[in-house]
Image (tube, grey):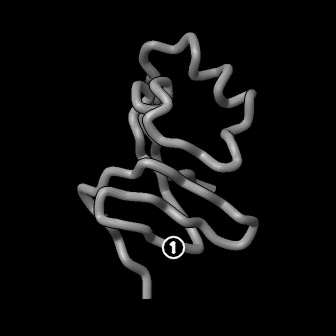
Amino acid sequence: MTQLHLNTTVHQVEFDGDSFTLATSQGRVTADFVIVTASLGVLKQGSIEFMPELPKKLKHHTHGVTMLTVPPCSPCHH
């Protein structure tokens, strides 16, 4: 059964190739999938430790960014 953990601070995200283990303010959580919705500031500060580390390309792109603007999405019509 899938569980959603709201209002939970994540300190570490570890991926071993099969599953994720998260160290959180509520204890350790193991999951098949993880959605991280951390702010750009949190990512830039390194407040969450990713193991293995995030790709250098991603870290490079967030380094000089002060705000990220995403255009609104609309449904695709085929």
Residue occupying the point 74% across, 28% down: 57
The location of residue 46, given as percent across then percent down, is 50, 31
- Please name whichever residue, 69 or 6, is drawn nearer the observer in this view of the structure: 6
In the displayed structure, does residue 42 sit left or right of residue 20?
Answer: left
Residue closer to the observer: 48 or 40: 48
Q: Is residue 32 left or right of residue 68?
A: right
Residue 16: quadrant of the picture:
bottom right
Q: How many marks?
A: 1
The residue lying toward the viewer, choosing from 78 and 66, is: 66
| Quarter in which the N terminus is drawn | bottom left
Residue in view at x 30 percent, y 57 percent: 25
Give the x, y percent position of residue 53.
68, 41
The C terminus, quarter of image:
bottom right
Q: Which quadrant would residue 5 be assigned to in this image?
A: bottom left
Look at label 1 and name its amino acid: Thr
Residue at x-position 49% and y-position 61%:
22
Relative to 39, residue 69 above or below: above
**From this viewpoint, which residue is outermost toward the left?**
7
Judged left or right of residue 14, residue 1 is left
Residue under numbered circle 1? 30
Q: Residues within 10 Å of mark 1 (few under 14, many from 20)?
A: some
**Residue 20: quarter of image:** bottom right
